[in-house]
Amino acid sequence: MLETRAQLCRLWLALCEGVSAKARVLLTVRFGGFEALFDAFPRDCANILSPKALEELASLKAIGLDKIALRLEQLGISVAFLGDERDYPTLLTSISDPPDLLFYKGRLSGQEERSISIVGSRRETRYGRNQAHTIARDLAANGIVIVSGLARGIDTAAHMGALDAGGRTIAVLGSGLSNIYPQENKELAERILQGGGAIISELPPAAEPLAFHFPVRNRIVSGLSHGVLLVEAREKSGTLITLGHALEQGREVFALPGEVDAPGSLIPHQMIREGARLCTCAQDILEDMGWQTQGPTQTEQIGLRFIGLSGEQGLIADFLQDEPKGYDDLLTATGLSASDLNTHITLMEMEGILEALPGRVFKLRRV
Amino acid sequence: MLMVGVPGSGKTMLARCLPGILPLMTQEEAFETTRIYSVAGMLKAGSGLMTQRPFRTPHHSASMAALIGGGANARPGEVSLAHNGVLFLDEMPEYPRTVLEALRQPLEDGVTTVSRVRAHMQYLSRCMLVASMNPCPCGYYGSAVKPCRCGSHKIRKYLDRISGPLLDRIDIQVEVDAVPMEEISTKSSAEDSKAVRDRVVAARARQLRRFSGLGIRSNAQMDGKHLEQLAQVRPEAIKLLQKAIQSYGFSMRAYGRLIKVARTIADLRSEEFIEIPAMAEAIQYRRIDAKYWGDVHA
């Protein structure tokens, strides 16, 4: 929360992207504090800061501290300072290089919240997307905060899952808060805020989504949570960086298994071999973290729900028990006429008992 | 009709078979179509009345004027040349979006108005739109044979080239499975075009009887009043339809269109009433959107 002049000066320095963490420390040590630095600027700064940063800071200084604060307020952006116990997330203080301050919209709390990060591929499969969504939903229903990066793919599915359970979810951006990336997730960001969550960034609001921002951002994703769940990742993915951070930060690492020959399973399976915890549902995470469950979790096995189904629909459900099957297989196995099968499929789909997949394949739904 | 399927699943071939199962034009229809060809200057010398239904396949580089009609003399476009026949758009997402959107009105009204400085013309354009597309840019989304290389973002962008309102106007959306090699070479037991055509002709005859004296010829042309009086839907089927509308969020337009499709299915089966199976089948034909791209959109 923004209150003192010292904080305003600290904010002033943070608004310039060209000031590295190292430069910040050097400057504050040299001047003995942010206020002294602000007052003295630009005297004695030239050998620490680049000409570009000097210029930017000078123009920010010319705007004036009060105006800067007002501008942020107009944008609806709050600032959490490292050391402020009211809104700076406690979990984040435990990592080796926490951001000096966080820009955020929505609600942040200094109190420790049970939270899990869900990360994974931007080129996800239907399977990964569904699982990330379900697990996030079930965790959120148990009061767990879901942290992710608002990227396409798994990130989006995780945020959506949490929102569908009416839960709280936090998105950590690799760009400034006024520059939500990717564009199509603007609406999702809005929903996250409405759902009582937060979107946060350590970068100034106008920062562009540059490639090198994301690996640095990833340390916050893992830092904000007690554990990180990996859903699908291919070789050389940014997800690996998040996992590296998680291990360094002493966070629990979970991995969702996939099909052995799917490209997205490569990294998760490798992680499991190296000691990550295998996770198949929200319950696995809750148990491993030693968290008591409050809401519903999904322990029901496929099929249990359908015992009560009537004759022909029961036949169809039975046949789909083990794995999704194609239309022609269903036709042969059930011995139904095409028109009867169509009718049952339509009805069962409407009841939410089965799901039609591309390629005329049908699958029983886990609910 | 929209056919979705992996490359090489025979979408184009199926479309080309279509004229073979359509009944010959009635005399009235033949006059209409011949007139349009005459205006376009496309009537071959020495040929009299056209009896074959037209099958038009404009390339996806075709201009708006070529497709809808236009030019200095307001010539009829492909959509009118396909009047009483089939307009086939192969690889629909490849067509410019503006062109696809412009198709909406002619398809809905059956009439195209072309206004130019020197001419203001109305052409009939009641044709069957048949389109094909791959499920995603690489073509293999949902395929069991080859993995798809596209992320959900890419697939969504591809699908976005076809607007919701346009998709809403396509009554029959089917998946086309790849045909295994052995089935291509061996003769399968499926009906041949002749048998199908006989059924189509019988169904058309039923419709002509149904609509005699009403000034319309087919189920597709029914309006709200006709639907109520002539569609003959069983109450159970209506209930199913209402439930589908609730669970799938179909539009009001879809409501009427579903009944028309179900009516046609019932006609093909020589059934007096629309029963649950016919309605269920009609509903299945509208589910492709959700099936392929439902969770990509979510």
Image: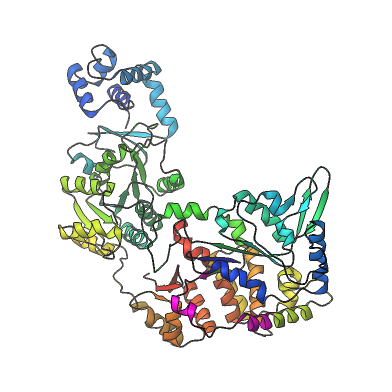
**Would residue A223 appear left or right of B142 to someone viewing this image?**
left
In which image quadrant can residue B131 be found? bottom right
Q: Quadrant of the C terminus of chain B?
A: bottom left
In which image quadrant can residue A77 be found? top left
Colour basis: rainbow
- The single residue placed furthest to the front in the displayed view is B46
The residue positioned 35% from the left and 63% from the top of the image is A127
Residue closest to the eye, B138 or B218 = B138
**Would residue A249 appear left or right of A10 to someone viewing this image?**
left
**Would residue A160 appear left or right of A230 to someone viewing this image?**
right
Residue closest to the eye, A307 or B268 = B268
Q: Is residue A198 above or below residue B32?
A: above
Q: Is residue B215 above or below residue B199?
A: above
- Confirm whether the magenta stretch covers residue A248: no
Magenta residues, start to end:
B175-200
The residue positioned 44% from the left and 75% from the top of the image is B180
In x, y percent, where is residue B178?
A: 47, 71
In x, y percent, where is residue A60?
A: 37, 20
Residue closest to the eye, A190 or B196 = B196
In which image quadrant can residue A334 be found? bottom left
In x, y percent, where is residue B101?
A: 64, 52
In x, y percent, where is residue B39?
A: 82, 57
